[in-house]
Amino acid sequence: MKATLDYILHLADNALILGQRNAEWCGHGPVLEQDIAISNISLDLIGQARSFYQYAAELKGSGTTEDDLAYLRDERQFLNILLVEQPKGDWAFTTLRQFLFSSYQQLLFQKLTTHADERLAAIAEKTLKEVNYHVRWSSEWVIRLGDGTEESRSRILNAIASIWTFTGEMFMSESFETASGIVVTELETSWREKIKTSFAEANIDAPDNTFMRSGGKKGIHSEHLGFILAEMQYLQRSYPGCEW
Amino acid sequence: MEKITDTIESIYEILGRVTDPEVHVLTILDLGIVRNVALKDDELIVTITSTYTGCPAMDMIAANIRMELAAAGYKNVRIEQSIRPAWTTDWMSEAGKEKLKEYGIAPPDKRFTIPEDGVGCPRCGSNNTRLVSEFGSTACKALYQCRDCHEPFDFFKCH
């Protein structure tokens, strides 16, 4: 029961934190259409997070709500991977992260659609339709930047260099995953193939595996998560139960 | 006493007055998001589904359903949300698609999901159009422009 709950929270936290990060672009995107695109992706991710939190809240019972789970847990209780909490960086960093993460989500949710837990399967089936858009949009950006100008290429290469150390955690099995019948290690080969294909179009080499940072799934986060939570949770902490 | 089927039918009529807060020409029945209506004892249960998971209009739609039903005398209403099967534009009514077109939004077309071109311009009817962005003013729409009359317009994505 604890493992199932933790697994759902892990899925929810990944979506919420990346949704919150991407939302920082709202009003700051490079052009209007792309500002709208990244904000739409944020909205999809927050929608995903809500579906997972609602399920987690029901499992937890005793009156727990989705808002309690999003707004009233502390850093150490968040089980998202480190990748999603890293600062938004420049446009290359943001689109690259989206591509790496959405490609992972796509493979994972394809698996989850046949999961024995029907509620999880239903959420995966629903959100997969949206994730497919995210993958296409972000892969196009990676190709455009990698195969673009000298400036855009140097930006995407810099983004790869700083982000790569956070990708390994997606494929490190945590006990709540194995207990839920999910073997993330199995996804790594297909994920690498997918990344390589788009990178090849952009004339970029996928880095060899280097040292991989981890800890997020255990609640041990980088310093960045605290700041996100401080901003996101401020209202509910200061005015508990406040509604719009 | 009224037969249950008649009651359910009249409830659908009431629901047909609730419109999408973002696209006012469409009713929630046109959109295909009302999945079920049931009467259980004194309680009326309306099951709806979201188009996209993050659709911010859902809470408002639920509130508007309550208001329309309350105005018709139904006070004891429960609104449930279902997610499976996942909503698809195939559930949108033909009448709804026509209304969209008249309103200036290109309706979803089964032939394509996100076509590079070929979406009919709702203003001049030309198929000589181009995709500007896969993401439009709401989660369910993409942005296009007509190459002939230059009208920028929304395309309701096939989903």
Image (cartoon, coloured by chain):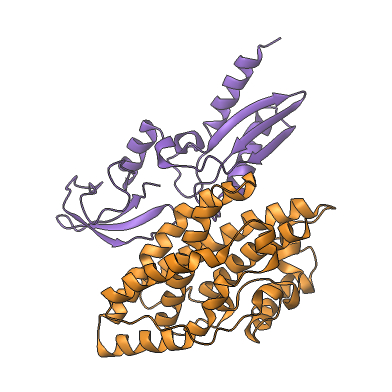
Chain colours: A orange, B purple
Residue for point 51% across, 47% down: B21
Residue A227 vertical placement versus B153 (above, below):
below
Task: Give the residue drawn at x 73%, y 32%.
Answer: B75
Quadrant of the frame with the C terminus of chain A: bottom right
* Rendered residue at 68%/77% (across/down): A229
Report the number of discs.
0
Q: Quadrant of residue B92?
A: top left
x 82%, y 53%: residue = A63
x, y percent for residue B125: 19, 44
Q: Would residue A115 be found to the left or right of residue B44 on screen? A: left
Q: Quadrant of residue A182?
A: bottom right
Task: Please provide percent x and percent y for residue A3.
Answer: 74, 60
Residue A227 appears in the rendering: yes
Vertical placement of B141 versus A196: above or below?
above
Q: Quadrant of the N terminus of chain A?
A: bottom right
Q: Is residue A141 visible?
A: no
Question: Left or right: where does residue B158 sit relative to residue B111?
Answer: right
Is B19 left, or right, of A59 in this rendering?
A: left
The residue lying furthest to the top in this view is B1
At which x and y percent is residue B154? 33, 53
